[in-house]
Amino acid sequence: MITVSPAATRSVRPAHSSREPACTRAAEEVAAEVVGEWGGVLGAAEVRALWAASARIAPQGPIRPAW
C-alpha cells in the first residue's frame, strides 16, 4: 500500500529552521546513494522505467517516503 504524507500535500509550507538546508542536503545525499544502488539491482533500463512511471504517478512533484 502506498501512503501519502499529509505534509507532502500541504499548500502552505511551514516556517523553515536554520538547520533545514543541511538536513535537506543530508537527506538528498542518502536518497541518491540508495537510488544509485537500485541500478545494481534493477539495471539501468528498469531504473529509467521506474522514473518514467513515477513521473506519470506524480506529475506535479516528487514522491516522498512517509516513514
Image (tube, grey):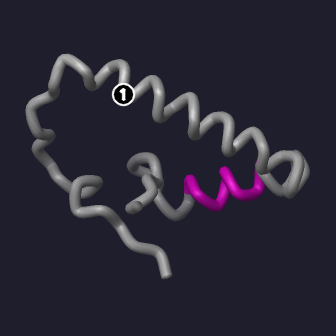
Q: Quadrant of residue 4?
A: bottom left
How crowded pointer 1 is (Cα within 10 Å; few <14, some 14-19, many 20+) is rated as few
Q: Which residues are magenta?
A: 48-55
17 vs 38: above or below? above
Give amino acid for label 1: Cys
Q: Quadrant of residue 32?
A: top right
Which residue shows up at 56% across the image and 53% down it? Answer: 55
Which residue shows up at 49% across the image and 82% down it? Answer: 1
Measured as percent of width and height from the top left, residue 12 is found at 11, 44
Front-lying residue, 49 or 6: 6
Which residue shows up at 45% across the image and 23% down it? Answer: 25
The prevailing secondary structure element of the residues shown in magenta is helix
1 vs 26: above or below? below
21 vs 3: above or below? above
Measured as percent of width and height from the top left, residue 65 is found at 45, 57
Which residue shows up at 83% across the image and 46% down it? Answer: 39
Residue 57 covered by magenta stretch: no
Measured as percent of width and height from the top left, residue 7 is found at 23, 54
Front-lying residue, 36 or 10: 36
Residue linked to disc 1: 23
Q: How many marks?
A: 1
- Horizontal relation, residue 47 to residue 21: left or right: right
